[in-house]
Image (cartoon, grey):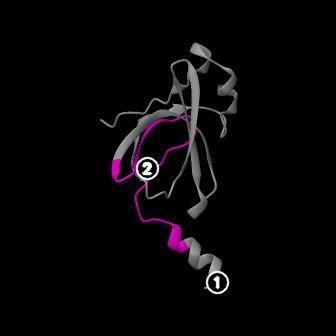
Amino acid sequence: MDAIQFVHDQLTTTAKVPAFKAGDNITVNYKIVEGTKERIQSFKGNVIKRQGNGATASFTVRKISDGVGVERLFPVNSPNIDSIIINKAGRVRRAKLYFLRERSGKSARIKEKRMAVKA
């Protein structure tokens, strides 16, 4: 096994990450360390992109806070991510939703993917 593959395997966590993609509305519960205290902060928004794979995979979440767009990039395999909750599955035709940065209000909405209910 070469050194790069060894480091890649060490950095990849065994935590179960739910399958989400661009357009989904998710909540990321992230551990924040302030001095000696540790707390969990939730960040709820739409996934704008997923990029990379393996240990270097990351995703960007965008939300509107007090009328200002806020984006945050999270590494998928970060030990500081407590949990990822999928709120809504979105229906989009793009892998990268950068066009949402210029939009606001109703034009920035993402359609919800409707799932069939098994009877």
Whether 118 is drawn above or below 65: the answer is below
Residue 29 or 35: which is nearer the viewer?
A: 35
Q: Secondary structure at mark 1?
A: loop
Residues shaded magenta: 9-38
Residue 17 or 58: which is nearer the viewer?
A: 58
Which residue is found at the position 66% from the left and 19% from the top?
103
Which residue is found at the position 69% from the left and 22% from the top?
102
Residue 69 place in picture, x, y as percent: 59, 26
Residue 54: which disc? Answer: none
- Locate residue 47: give its quadrant: top right
Residue 112 place in picture, x, y as percent: 49, 27
Q: Is residue 36 magenta?
A: yes
Q: Secondary structure at mark 2?
A: loop
User: Which residue extends farthest front?
Assistant: 35
Mark 1 or 2, nearer chain start: 1
- Locate residue 16: give its quadrant: bottom left
Q: Is residue 74 magenta?
A: no
Of the residues shown, which amino acid type is indicated by label 1? Answer: Asp
Q: Residues within 10 Å of mark 1 (few under 14, many from 20)?
A: few
Residue 45 place in picture, x, y as percent: 49, 32
| Residue 30 as seen in the image, left or right of residue 63 | left
Q: Which residue is mark 2?
A: 18
Q: Which residue is mark 1?
A: 2
User: Which residue extends farthest left?
Assistant: 119
Where's the N terminus, which quadrant? bottom right
